[in-house]
Image: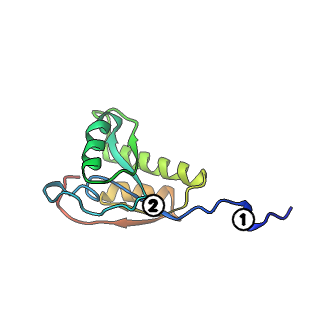
Amino acid sequence: MYMPPWAFPIQKPMKSFDIDGVIYLGDLGVGVFPGPEDILITGRSYQEAPKTLRWLQARGINNQVFFNPLDEKDKTRPSSGEHKARTLKGLIENGYRIDVHFEDDPIQKAIIEERLPFLKVIHLVHELTEK
């Protein structure tokens, strides 16, 4: 059955961003600034959400944030990478058009690329924040 182009919602391309090491650069404050339609996927635990959201909002960053569902004491770099890959996959499968993800952690970058080989992952390399 033919469907005219106007029958489908147009999904704008968006980007996703890690927080620590991408948006938050320690003593330097804000690093890469997301656009208003972009999303944040962080390895930070859901328990860190109130403090994190206050920090972001104080800097004019009001994007949707996906926190790690693990307790703060249980999260690891690999488990945070798995969380990011699962979240990205779920969003894409549900119609989000995510063109690129910004990541500073090489372990998490590798996990995302392994699970989502079609997604471009931009690796920010620096020593400003602890991995």
Residue nearest the observer in this picture, 14 or 101: 14
Amino acid type assigned to the residue bearing label 2 in the image: Glu
Q: Nearer the viewer, mark 1 or mark 2?
A: 1
Task: Give the secondary structure at mark 1.
Answer: helix
* Residue at which label 2 appears: 113
Classify 13 as above or below 82: below
Q: Position of residue 107 (x, y in %)?
A: 34, 55
First-in-chain label (1 vs 2)? 1
Q: Work out whether 83 lies above or below 71.
A: below
Q: Which residue shows up at 60% across the image and 52% down it?
A: 93
Q: Residue furthest right?
A: 1
Q: Across the whole image, how many numbered discs are drawn on residues?
A: 2
> Tag 2's secondary structure?
helix
Q: Is residue 2 left or right of residue 89?
A: right
Question: The N terminus appears in which quarter of the rendering?
Answer: bottom right
Q: CA distance from mark 1 to mark 2?
A: 33 Å
Q: Compared with residue 91, is residue 128 higher up or lower down, i.e. above or below?
A: below
